[in-house]
Image (tube, grey):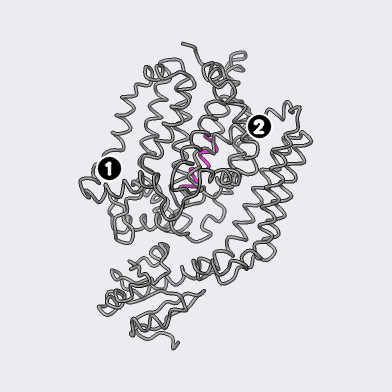
């Protein structure tokens, strides 16, 4: 059996002995981690919680803390089996430290994001050297999808940290001389179990798919079976994760089985909530979420997969890009054939893509390619120009489709970004132009720095100026009315939402909500008459209709096209 091929770091140490990195060599990654932490934590509490996922997860955490039931998650008083409990526990820790707020509920994602950048750097450094590892970490940090999901009160960034760590550990274990790889296989098992407890089987499934693809290419199934002891892996993963699932089955029976099937098998085989699309759905998604690095990704993958079987069977250094490319391709195919599609589903391929592109840029810095990568650079320029034009013309687009927006979000009466929309457009255009120009001149370090700087400045502009304006028009009115309802509705009582229900209303009111759809007016009238419902939120245009349903209700407050009506005397309108 072949031993592990030496990494760049190993080669240096073999000649000179173990070398402690000089302080100045740590400076670039320290600065990059500081930038990552700043981008993920800066104004983390803005905007308010978005619907549906952020608000649903956050309310489940709040109810878990208030009710003291740390076993079965609940939302709006009903069981919530969408996800296992570990994500709620991780979200609850910052809440107990900082108090209940948007910042604390999102803090776990920001922490996982910073940890993922460091993990990516350390793993890449072992196989491609320090310079390429730094470029890879920078590509990950300066990616739109990474920055957005690293600030969200949902599972995905935490899951990405666990699945990425599991795949890194698997690769390290495979190429470690026996029996030194076995501890890394056990680390992989523990991370898979934690991923299972964060978001169910999707995490272990993605890791298993990528690992099996690499083992097939490397012809390493027998080697893996001999060294990894798969039976022990199964015992560890199930032993750590299965108890909670077994308890849910005992406590809730068929209701839990139905919910588990709905959020796993049904979600993959059927389109849920209108979130469908074709098998080509993720091509533009990847293009945008990993921009400006995405145009360089196809070439890196194709180059890595040329003669992939031979490369995969040589050593750790030769098989490393093959491993990353198989990881990317199989994850992309797996989610492309899912019937339910969300942009963030494709997140698991981000670290591998960042390493491949970062490694390629590092090679070009040292040895510029003979050809100037004109197709990729032209794509950077084209996508950047389209994004800039779209942002600059956002007011015109919004004006044209305002009616459709108001149908879904009645609070969005107007949206004026002032000079900030044009500022963002200028950053995107100039940044993409700088990447294109520097690349065409074979100044790849400058191209990389331009991309990192442009994405960072664009994101700071969005977080500091644009999101507050969007929050004020789209989210704040409903949030304010929900908080007001929470003060007026006694604890233990409920209030109703007519036609405009949002999960965030449950969180901000801290009261149980009765959702009433059009055609259920008699049900609402009965609950108002019985005293079960003492307040109703509806569109302002529905005020007269609500008064006919519940004559005892009067208008308490109106904001952004929404009206809060309560029992007793309110405003005269």
Q: CA distance from mark 1 to mark 2?
A: 47 Å
- Give 423 or 289, whichever is nearer the viewer: 289
Identify the residue at image location x=49%, y=61%.
Answer: 48
Circles 1 and 2: CB atoms closer than 8 Å: no
Residue bearing the label numbered 2: 24
Percent across and percent down for residue 165 are: 46, 33
Q: Judge from the rendering whether residue 483 lies leftward or rightward of residue 14; answer left or right.
A: left
Asked which secondary structure carries label 1, the reply is helix
Asked which secondary structure carries label 2, the reply is helix
Residue 429 colored magenta? no
Which sits earlier in the primary sequence, circle 1 or circle 2? 2
Residue bearing the label numbered 1: 244
Residue 335 vertical placement versus 133 (above, below): below
Q: Which residues are magenta?
A: 109-119
Q: Judge from the rendering whether residue 444 lies leftward or rightward of residue 125; answer left or right.
A: right
Label 1 environment density (alpha carbons within 10 Å; few <14, some 14–19, many ≥20): some
Identify the residue at image location x=44%, y=37%.
Answer: 162
Percent across and percent down for residue 96 are: 39, 53
């Amino acid at each position: 059996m072949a031993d592990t091929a030496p990494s760049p770091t190993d080669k240096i140490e073999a000649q000179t002995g173990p070398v402690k990195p000089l302080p100045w060599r740590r400076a670039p990654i320290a600065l990059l981690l500081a930038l990552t932490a700043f981008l993920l934590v800066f104004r983390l509490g803005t905007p308010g919680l978005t619907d549906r996922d952020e608000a649903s997860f956050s309310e489940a955490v709040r109810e878990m803390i208030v009710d003291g039931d740390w076993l079965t998650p609940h939302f709006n008083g009903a069981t919530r089996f969408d996800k296992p409990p570990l994500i709620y526990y991780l979200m609850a820790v910052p809440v107990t430290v900082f108090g209940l707020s948007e910042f604390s509920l999102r803090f776990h994602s920001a922490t996982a994001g910073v940890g993922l950048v460091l993990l990516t750097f350390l793993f890449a450094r072992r196989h491609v050297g320090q310079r390429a590892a730094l470029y890879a970490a920078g590509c990950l940090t300066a990616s739109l999808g990474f920055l957005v999901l690293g600030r969200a009160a949902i599972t995905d960034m935490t899951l990405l940290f666990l699945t990425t760590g599991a795949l890194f550990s698997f690769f390290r274990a495979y190429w470690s001389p026996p029996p030194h790889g076995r501890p890394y296989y056990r680390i992989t098992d523990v991370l898979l179990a934690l991923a299972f407890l964060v978001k169910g089987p999707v995490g272990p499934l993605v890791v298993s798919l990528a690992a099996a693809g690499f083992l097939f290419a490397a012809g390493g199934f027998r080697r893996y079976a001999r060294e990894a002891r798969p039976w022990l892996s199964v015992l560890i993963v199930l032993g750590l994760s299965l108890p909670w699932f077994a308890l849910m089955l005992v406590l809730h029976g068929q209701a839990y089985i139905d919910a588990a099937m709905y959020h796993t098998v049904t979600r993959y085989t059927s389109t849920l909530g209108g979130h469908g699309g074709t098998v080509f759905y993720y091509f533009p998604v990847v293009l945008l979420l990993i921009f400006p690095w995405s145009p360089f990704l196809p070439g890196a993958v194709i180059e890595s997969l040329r003669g992939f079987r031979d490369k995969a069977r040589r050593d750790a250094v030769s098989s490393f890009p093959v491993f990353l490319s198989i990881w990317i391709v199989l994850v992309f195919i797996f989610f492309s054939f899912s019937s339910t599609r969300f942009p963030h589903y494709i997140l698991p391929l981000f670290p591998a893509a960042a390493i491949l592109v970062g490694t390629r840029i590092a090679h070009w810095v040292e040895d510029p390619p003979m050809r100037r990568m004109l197709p990729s650079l032209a794509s950077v320029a084209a996508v950047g120009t389209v994004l800039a034009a779209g942002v600059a013309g956002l007011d015109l687009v919004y004006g044209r489709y305002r009616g459709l927006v108001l149908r879904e979000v009645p609070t969005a009466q107007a949206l004026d970004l002032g000079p900030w929309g044009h500022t963002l457009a200028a950053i995107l255009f100039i940044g993409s132009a700088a990447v294109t120009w520097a690349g065409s001149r074979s100044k790849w370090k400058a191209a990389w720095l331009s991309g990192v700087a442009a994405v960072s400045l664009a994101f700071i502009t969005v977080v500091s100026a644009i999101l507050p304006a969007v929050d004020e028009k789209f989210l704040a009115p409903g949030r304010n009315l929900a908080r007001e309802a929470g003060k007026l509705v006694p604890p233990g009582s409920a209030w109703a939402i007519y036609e405009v229900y949002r999960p965030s209303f449950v969180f901000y009111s801290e009261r149980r909500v009765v959702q009433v759809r059009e055609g259920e007016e008699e049900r609402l009238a009965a609950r108002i008459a019985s005293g079960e419902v003492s307040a109703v939120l509806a569109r302002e245009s529905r005020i007269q209709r609500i008064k006919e349903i519940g004559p005892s209700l009067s208008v308490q407050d109106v904001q952004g096209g929404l009206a809060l009506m309560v029992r007793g005397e309110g405003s005269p309108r």
